[in-house]
Image: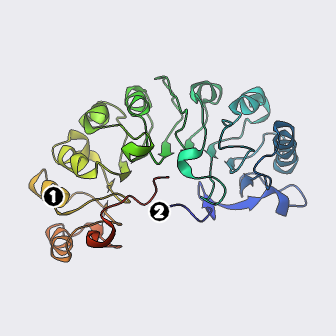
C-alpha cells in the first residue's frame, strides 16, 4: 500500500504551489509547496525554486513550507544546508514538511533523508516539523523549546531514530506521531525503544500520541495498556497498521481509556464483534474503527511500507 495524494492544508493553512502564484501573498495565509517536476532536477534548479518561493513569501520567508521532490530524492538527501544557510531570511518559518511525495514520485522507503539535528538547532522558533522517509534519517538528542508537533512518516523507522526521539528534550511538544513501518524496510524499532515516551518521562506537555503504520502494533498495544503517558493523552492513534483482536484485548484489559477524546484504530484487522466491543466499552470516546480488513485473502499489511 502506498501514498497517492498530496496535502491540501498544512499547519492549518491552504497549500499553494509556487508555480501557481504570480505575486507575493501574505505568508501567514498559505503554506507554500515546492515540488520539482523533474525528479532528477539539479541542486541548482531546486535552489532557484527556493528563491522563487522567497520572492513570493516576503522578507521573513514563509510561515509554513512543504517540500515534495527536490531532485533525485531516491538517492540524494534533502539539502537541509540550504535552509540552514538561509536561516536569517527564514525568520517567519514555523512549520516545515520535507518529503511530501506520492508513491508515483518516490516510494516512501526510497526517500533519502539525513541528520536533521543541525536544522532543528538553526530554527529554534520552529513549531511543526514533519518528515517523510527514514532512509539515512538521523537525530541527535537535543533540547528544542519551540517544537510542538513532530511527525515522522516512514515505511520502516530505525530503532536508533525512535530512541533518539525519546531522548530529546521538547518541553512544549504536544503532538508526536511516528510511523514505525515494517522490518523489511528498516523498521526494527520495538516497544522497548519507546520506553521514555510511554513512561511519560519524555515530553511533559504531550497530549497526542500516534504510533502508526506499525507491523508491531499489537506489541505496542500491550505496552500502551500500562503506559503512564496515556493518562494525560486526549488522542491515541494506533491506526494504519495491523491491529487485530489481540491488540484490542490488550487495550481493554489495561488502564482506563475513557478519558480520551479520540482513539484512532482505522485500517485494522479486528473482527466485527471486537470492533463493536471497543466502541461499546469506551462510551464518550470518538473511536474510529473504520476500514476493517479481512486478513484471509492477503494477510495483514500496513497502509504504507515500500
Residue for point 20% across, 41% down: 227
Q: Nearer the viewer, mark 2 or mark 1?
A: 2
Residue 254: x %, y % from top left: 12, 51
Q: Residue 72 or 200: which is nearer the viewer? A: 72
Residue 167: x %, y % from top left: 38, 26
Identity of the residue furthest to the front in this view = 297
249 shown above or below 171 = below
Q: Residue 152 or 103: which is nearer the viewer? A: 103
Give the left or right position of residue 297, taking residue 180 as reference: left
Q: Is mark 2 on a helix, strand or loop?
A: loop
**Dot 1 corresponds to which residue?**
246
Residue for point 83% across, 63% down: 20
Mark 1 neighbour density, 10 Å: few (under 14) some (14–19) many (20 or more): some
Q: Residue 179 or 280: which is nearer the viewer? A: 179
- Residue 251 appearing in the image: yes
14 shown above or below 149 = below
Q: What element carries label 1?
A: helix
Residue 90: x %, y % from top left: 75, 36
Q: Tell me how far mark 2 sits from mark 1, CA to CA.
A: 23 Å
The answer to the question of whether label 2 and label 1 lie on touching residues, with beta carbons closer than 8 A, is no
Give the left or right position of residue 236, taking residue 174 as reference: left
Quarter-of-image position of residue 81: top right
**Dot 2 corresponds to which residue?**
1
Quarter-of-image position of residue 86: top right
Quarter-of-image position of residue 160: top left
Marks 2 and 1, the one that precedes in the sequence:
2
Identity of the residue furthest to the left in this view = 253
- Residue 176 appearing in the image: no
Residue for point 17% across, 47% down: 222
115 shown above or below 92 = above
Amino acid at each position: 500500500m502506498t501514498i497517492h495524494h498530496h496535502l491540501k492544508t498544512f499547519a492549518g493553512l491552504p497549500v499553494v504551489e509556487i508555480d501557481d502564484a504570480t505575486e507575493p501573498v501574505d505568508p501567514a495565509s498559505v503554506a507554500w509547496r515546492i515540488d520539482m517536476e523533474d525528479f532528477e532536477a539539479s541542486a541548482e534548479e531546486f535552489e532557484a525554486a527556493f528563491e522563487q518561493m522567497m520572492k513570493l513569501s516576503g522578507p521573513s520567508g514563509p510561515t509554513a513550507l512543504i517540500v515534495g521532490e527536490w531532485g533525485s530524492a531516491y538517492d540524494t538527501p534533502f539539502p537541509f544546508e540550504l535552509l540552514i544557510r538561509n536561516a536569517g531570511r527564514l525568520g517567519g518559518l514555523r512549520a516545515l514538511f520535507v518529503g511530501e511525495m506520492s508513491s508515483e514520485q518516490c516510494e516512501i522507503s526510497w526517500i533519502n533523508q539525513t541528520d536533521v539535528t543541525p536544522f532543528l538547532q538553526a530554527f529554534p522558533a520552529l513549531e511543526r516539523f514533519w518528515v517523510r522517509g527514514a532512509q539515512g534519517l538521523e537525530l541527535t538528542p537535543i533540547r528544542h523549546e519551540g517544537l510542538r508537533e513532530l511527525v515522522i512518516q516512514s515505511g520502516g523507522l530505525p530503532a536508533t531514530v525512535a530512541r533518539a526521539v525519546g531522548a530529546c528534550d521538547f518541553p512544549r511538544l504536544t503532538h508526536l506521531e511516528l510511523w514505525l513501518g515494517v522490518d523489511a524496510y528498516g523498521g526494527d524499532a520495538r516497544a522497548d525503544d519507546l520506553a521514555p515516551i510511554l513512561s511519560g518521562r519524555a515530553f511533559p506537555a504531550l497530549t497526542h500520541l500516534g504510533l502508526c503504520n506499525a507491523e508491531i502494533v499489537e506489541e505496542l498495544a500491550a505496552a500502551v495498556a500500562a503506559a503512564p503517558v496515556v493518562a494525560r493523552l486526549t488522542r491515541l492513534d494506533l491506526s494504519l497498521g495491523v491491529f487485530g483482536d489481540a491488540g484490542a484485548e490488550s487495550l481493554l484489559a489495561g488502564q482506563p481509556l475513557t478519558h480520551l477524546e479520540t482513539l484512532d484504530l482505522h485500517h485494522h484487522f479486528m473482527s466485527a464483534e471486537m470492533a463493536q466491543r471497543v466502541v461499546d466499552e469506551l462510551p464518550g470516546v470518538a473511536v474510529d474503527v473504520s476500514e476493517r480488513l479481512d486478513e484471509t485473502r492477503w494477510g495483514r499489511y500496513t497502509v504504507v511500507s515500500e
